[in-house]
Image (spheres, grey):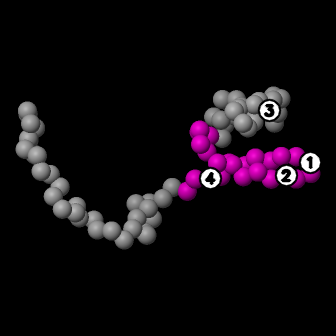
């Protein structure tokens, strides 16, 4: 499918291609998403890198610290209508 011809634009010291919203929506792309770039048969092929959703256990698999707060956690008295 051809959306339209895109132009390379100068951005600061580099260059980039602005992707139209319809293309971003079609592939659920967001700013800062990553792509792999492959050159094959004189074509540049961009493929979005799938973000793996990590479980909480996977996110903390290499964590070696304590789960308990270190030292005093709350030292101030309540102010105003605060009650803890």
Q: Residues within 10 Å of mark 1 (few under 14, many from 20)?
A: few
Mark 1 sits on what residue? 42
**SS at mark 2 in the image:** strand
Q: Residue at x 18, y 62 (%)?
A: 71
Mark 4 sits on what residue? 50
Q: Residue at x 92, y 48 (%)?
A: 42
In magenta, the rendered stretch is 29-52
Q: Residues within 10 Å of mark 4 (few under 14, many from 20)?
A: few
Work out whether residue 43 or residue 25 is closer to the camera in this orientation and state it.
43
- Quadrant position of residue 29: top right
Residue 5, placed above or below residue 40: above
- First in sequence, mark 2 or 4: give its number: 2
Q: In 3D space, how far apart are the residues under numbered discs 1 and 2 (Cα atoms)?
A: 7 Å
Q: Residue at x 61, y 45 (%)?
A: 33
- First in sequence, mark 3 or 2: give its number: 3
- Asked whether residue 6 is in view, the answer is no
- Quadrant position of residue 77: top left
- First in sequence, mark 4 or 3: give its number: 3
**SS at mark 4 in the image:** loop
Left or right: where 59 falls relative to 39? left
Q: Residues within 10 Å of mark 3 (few under 14, many from 20)?
A: few
Q: In 3D space, how far apart are the residues under numbered discs 1 and 3 (Cα atoms)?
A: 17 Å
Name, please, the residue furthest toward the right.
41
Mark 3 sits on what residue? 8
Contact flag, marks 1 and 2 (Cβ < 8 Å): yes
Q: Nearer the viewer, mark 1 or mark 3?
A: 3
């Amino acid at each position: 499918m051809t959306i339209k011809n895109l132009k390379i634009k100068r951005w600061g010291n580099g260059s980039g291609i602005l992707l139209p919203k319809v293309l971003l929506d079609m592939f659920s792309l967001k700013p800062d998403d990553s792509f792999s770039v492959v050159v094959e048969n004189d074509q540049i092929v961009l493929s979005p890198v799938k973000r793996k959703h990590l479980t909480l256990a996977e996110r903390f698999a290499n964590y070696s610290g304590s789960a308990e707060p270190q030292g005093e956690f709350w030292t101030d008295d309540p102010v105003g209508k605060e009650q803890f």
